[in-house]
Amino acid sequence: MSATQPAPGPAGSPTAGYGRFAPSPSGRLHVGNLRTALAARQLAEATGRGFLVRMEDLDQLRSADAETIGAGQLADLAAIDVISDVAVVWQRDRLSAYAAAVAELAPLTYECFCTRAEIRAASRAPHGAQRPYPGTCRDLTDAERDRRRRDRPAALRVRSGDQWISFDDRWQGEQRAFVDDFVVRRNDGGFAYNLAVVLDDAWQQVSQVVRGADLMESTGRQIWLQRQLGLPEPEWAHVGLVLNSDGVRLAKRDGAVDLGELAELGISAEQVRAGLVRSLGGPGEPIGPASGANPAGPGQTWVWHGPGSLS
Ligand SMILES: [Zn+2]
């Protein structure tokens, strides 16, 4: 079976496909992560989809703690009633599928020997948060490539044609993202996030991607890959970020922000869940875009003023 072909669904798998939450096992989930997970679970349910959790451990393949951390994340998710309908897939078990897709993309890829500093120095002005790859290695001669291979191993980039891709986001509206010649295999041999998620989503029949708005910029690259590989394009729904009262993205340094720390303050997982549901627009109706009647809404940023924000 081709690596890019969706797996035959398990008996009784939903015809509308799955929604998903895909954390990286790098630390305990905080309320921002839990809020995104709840939004994904609720929207999947409200739109007749199944729901799955996937562990995106591409950056933790050599970590001895990843399995323990991942298990803890799954326990925290279960405590707020976010449970995968199917067995949890870990990306470490998918490496051969990623390798097959890189081989399939070979006519479109080229070796890049640039360091981060070289890219920064040669790049034009950033497009939003992105600094596009300036194309330095796109047209190297065979002799130049041979010479540079002696200096350092190559990453593989796709020849994207440097283009803007437009897409509709359920919660953020019409979006545009710039697609440069991005990396699909890093120079340490590791596979790039954009490649892996696109393959995993198609293989797992994910038809709805709910995730934090910090990943909005990567959507264009992922759509580009889906089109090149002939994969279906899911619905996109980016959740507004959770910010601290200084307007900075919530992080561990912001005090009691995970279920363990909140439990020490006497706040149960059920209370956390109820508070997060309210922040997403309230219980009772399928969550939708923010409106007059629903001024919170999952697309809006949510300011965390401490545990009191949950009540
Ligand atoms: Zn390069």
Image (tube, helix red, strand yellow):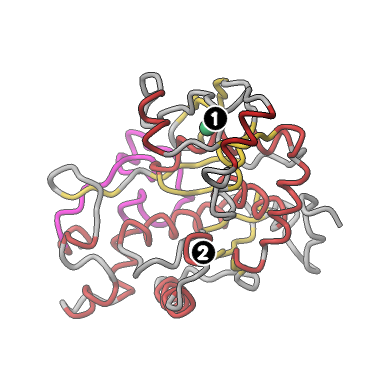
Q: Which mark is residue 168?
A: 1
In the shown orientation, is residue 21 left or right of residue 205?
left
Residue type, label 2: Asp
Percent of width and height locating residue 60: 47, 66
Nearest to the observer: residue 96 or residue 251:
96
Q: Looking at the figure, which quarter contains the C terminus?
A: bottom left
Label 2 element class = loop
- The spot of residue 271 in percent (x, y) is 28, 71
Q: Amino acid at mark 1?
A: Asp
> Which span is picked out in magenta?
277-306
Element type where label 1 sits in the image: strand
Q: Which mark is residue 57?
A: 2
Q: Is residue 136 magenta?
A: no
Q: Which mark is residue 301?
A: none
Taking the spot 37% from the left edge, 59% from the top edge, the residue there is 33
Q: Position of residue 226 (x, y in %)?
A: 68, 38
Residue drawn at (18%, 79%), measured in percent from left and top? 266
Ligand 1 has an atom within 8 Å of the beta carbon of the residue at disc 2: no
